[in-house]
Amino acid sequence: MGSVHYFQRYHSKENVDTANAMLLLSRLYYHSPPAFYGFLSSVFGDSGLGLEFSLQEHGEQTVPDAAIIQPGFKVVCETKLDAKSFTDKQIKGHCEGSFGKGSAHQFLLTLSPQALSPSEQDRVRSIVAGVNPCIGYAHLTFEGLHNGVRDEVDERDREFEGILDDYWDYCSTSGLIPGDWRNLLVRVAGRSFDYDIENGVYCDTPRGSGRHGYFGLYRDKSVQAIGKIEAVVDCRVINGAIKDPTVIQGEAGNGTPGGMLTAALRERIIKTHRDNALGDWVTRYHFVEHFYDTDYKKTSKRGLWGRRVFNLCSVLGVKTLPDIEGIAEGLRNRYWE
């Protein structure tokens, strides 16, 4: 039941995290230069042409984790697993020695799992400006990098959607997206909508294995129901028997996360398989405790194609989420593109 991965999973940690971030951006550039330029514009307010991607390029004083280069244009990237680890000395060294000559447009990008506080961003920006006020600066989280790229790609682009799914999977399972409990995974529900609501389940093909706290059902330009995820399981059902189950998420058996399936969960899988006349292929079953009605409307022209992930804390403007009924009520009369 293995799936194809676009991003390497073995770790020398920061090096691999940086390499995968650069791989995502390079794939975006070669897939759609306009989308790549749009991403850079959203981050730095500028873009360039004829880009080159480089890892561990040696500067005169420091070694940045990565760089994106073209004649007259360069982005230097520094990655840390702790947002508090960006030191004055290193930032100053990058600005003084990593850009070289001939780059009219210069940008420094810091990347970490956590957001930098406004005061920390001001500190880095002050260091950068003290060396060269012409160097642009921005900070992104890994989640922000994923979402920024996603915003530039057509939702109907199945090829790149698979790349984004795998990058989210890599970041989620590698601990680069903290607080995955706050995330709402939304999928399109068509003819199965009423069945899904009644039975607290959604079936689709396995795509990535990143964790999410909540699941939403979308139809008619709106997320119309959400539920707290109880379990996510990949398996085949052949002649009424479950084969090769893989527990992606949830305490599936005997109180042990990722353990053996409980008898009740096995019954739900077999019933769902039978009721929906599914074949013997691998299916992913998303189980929720209960679906609650909501109305989180999509305002952009096209309907949702594939899936979407929302940070519920950001959407609702809170640090601590209310209960699921409060979340459902809070999403009513809110909008997204």
Image: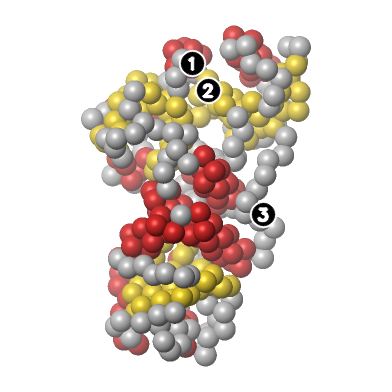
Residue 206 in view here: yes
- The residue lying toward the viewer, choosing from 70 and 256, is 70
Say which residue label 3 marks: 9
Say which residue label 2 marks: 202
- Kindly give the residue lying farthest to the top in the view shown: 275
Q: Residue at x 43, y 53 (%)?
A: 149
Q: Earlier in the sequence, mark 3 or mark 1?
A: 3
Image marks 2 and 1: residues in contact by CB distance under 8 Å: yes
User: Which mark is in front, 2 or 1?
Assistant: 1
Say which residue label 1 marks: 192
Q: Residue at x 66, y 14 (%)?
A: 270
| Disc 3 residue type (three-letter) | Arg
- Tell me the distance, in whole angstroms, between the alpha carbons under discs 3 and 1: 35 Å
Could you tell me residue 96's position as x and y percent?
Answer: 43, 88
- Kindly give the residue lying farthest to the left in the view shown: 333
- Tell me the distance, in whole angstroms, between the alpha carbons under discs 2 and 1: 8 Å
Q: Residues within 10 Å of mark 1 (few under 14, many from 20)?
A: some
